[in-house]
Amino acid sequence: MAKTAKILIVDDNQDLLFTMETFLKRNGFDVQTADDGQKGLALIKGSHPDLILLDIMMETTFSGLDVCKAVRADASLNHIPIIGISGIGHEMGIQIDKWGDDDYFSVDEFFEKPVDREKLLERIKVRLKKGVIKRGHPDL
C-alpha cells in the first residue's frame, strides 16, 4: 500500500496557506501548515515531512532563511527537499536567477509568487520521487 506524501507549507500569508493546502489536499497529499518559522521548524522536527514549501521572507522573527539553515544543519532533517517560495522579486521588480545558496538558503528549487500551482505540483512530484529513490522507499 502506497504511503501518502506529507507536505509542510510554511508561510505567513494566511490566504496562500489556505489555497495551497486545499490544492495539495485535492491532489492527494497529507498537508500541514505553519504561519511562522518557529512553528514550521517545530513541525519539521516533530513530523519529518516528505517535502517543505517554504516562504523566504516572513514578517516574523524566524524567517524562511532561518528555517532552511536549521533544517540543512540537522543531519536527521537535511535530506528533506525544500522548495523556496517568495514574492520578493515581484515586489521589488528584480529577477531572481539563482534559487539557492549553499551557505545560507540551500533550497532544491525556487518559485516566485504568485505561484503557478500546476507547475509547482509537477515539481513537487519530481522532488518527492527523487527523495523516495534517495531514501529507498519505492512504494510512494
Image (cartoon, helix red, strand yellow):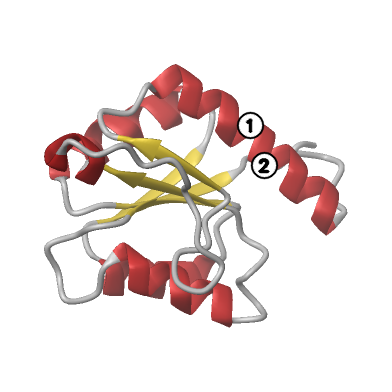
The residues tagged by marks 1 and 2 sit, at their Cα atoms, a distance apart of: 5 Å
Q: Which mark is residue 45?
A: none
Q: If the image is split into quadrants, where does the C terminus sit?
A: top right
Label 1 CA crowd tier, 10 Å (few <14, some 14–19, many 20+):
few
Identify whether 92 is placed above or below 47.
above
Give residue 37's position: percent from left, percent from top.
28, 68
Answer left or right for 100 relative to 13: right
Q: Are marks 1 and 2 in contact (CB under 8 Å)?
A: yes
* Residue 135, picture quadrant: bottom right
Local SS, label 1: helix
Total number of numbered labels?
A: 2
Label 2 CA crowd tier, 10 Å (few <14, some 14–19, many 20+):
some
Give residue 123's position: percent from left, percent from top.
58, 31
* Residue designated by label 1: 125
**What's under tag 2, amino acid-wise?**
Leu
* Residue 79, picture quadrant: bottom right
Local SS, label 2: helix
Identify whether 22 is placed above or below 86.
above
Seen from the viewer's position, the closer of residues 121 and 139 is 121
Give residue 106's position: percent from left, percent from top.
53, 62
Identify whether 134 is placed above or below 47.
above
* Residue designated by label 2: 128
Kindly identify the residue that appears in the image at 28 percent across and 74 percent down: 38
Answer left or right for 29 relative to 87: right
Seen from the viewer's position, the closer of residues 21 and 52 is 52
Q: If the image is split into quadrants, where does the N terminus sit?
A: top right
Kindly identify the residue that appears in the image at 73 percent across and 49 percent down: 131
Identify whether 35 is placed above or below 104.
above
Kindly identify the residue that appears in the image at 31 percent across and 56 percent down: 56
Seen from the viewer's position, the closer of residues 52 and 84 is 84
Give residue 31's position: percent from left, percent from top.
43, 44
Seen from the viewer's position, the closer of residues 42 and 113 is 113
